[in-house]
Image (cartoon, rainbow, N blue to C red):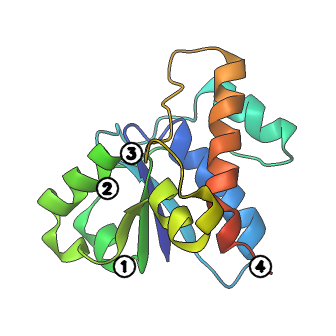
Amino acid sequence: MILLVCTGNTCRSPLAAAYLDSITGEDVQVLSAGLMAFDDMPASEYSKKVAEEAGLDISKHKSKQVTQNLVKSAGLILTMTKAHKNTLLNTFPESKGKVYTLKEHSMLYNKDKRTSKSYDITDPFGRTKEEYMECFQEIKESLQHLGKK
């Protein structure tokens, strides 16, 4: 199982999970959660719109908090920021060796992207639809290496 983690599990990680699920196929389980999530919140409106425009449906998404069971079950944990990664490693030391930022993991597989200045996917929360679209583009570029060849 691949777990995608952000802060509130309403913007970045639901988009990332929906996209990753669409490119990996049924043999890979993909889940998302947030480090500071309130359970059962819907995805943000702009996340839903951006997903819909990309042919993805996150309309039924309900946010959830990262738990020890999720961390234990995951074979790979991808976070949106370095701060998320560090929080996970401090809170769940057993996650060591399987937690990376999205961009960090992508850079391990894509030598041409090693020039990225930041390991973070920008948080679009409270911003414009265009910024959500830019965020989603960053997410897609960072996850393409995990898709079926």
Q: Secondary structure at mark 4?
A: loop
Image position of 54 with respect to 146: above or below: above
Mark 1 vs mark 2, CA separation in Å: 11 Å
Q: Is residue 61 visible?
A: no
Instruction: Please name the amino acid that badge 3 sits on.
Output: Thr
User: Decide: marks 4, 1 in contact (CB < 8 A)?
Assistant: no
User: Which residue is the site of mark 2?
Assistant: 66
Q: Which residue is mark 1?
A: 73
* N-term-proximal mark, 4 vs 2: 2
State the count of labels.
Answer: 4
**Which secondary structure lies at badge 3?**
loop
Q: Is residue 135 left or right of residue 107?
A: right
What amino acid type is highlighted by mark number 1? Ser
Q: Dividing the picture into quarters, in which one does residue 49 lie?
A: top right
The residue identified by callout 3 is: 81
Counting residues from the start of the chain, the first of labels 1 and 3 encountered is: 1
Between circles 3 and 2, the one closer to the viewer is 3
Give the Cα distance between marks 4 and 1: 22 Å
Kind of residue indicated by mark 4: Lys
Q: For the point 57% across and 47% down, which residue is it?
A: 14
Q: Are marks 3 and 2 in contact (CB under 8 Å)?
A: no
Q: CA distance from mark 3 to mark 4?
A: 25 Å
Q: Which residue is mark 4?
A: 148
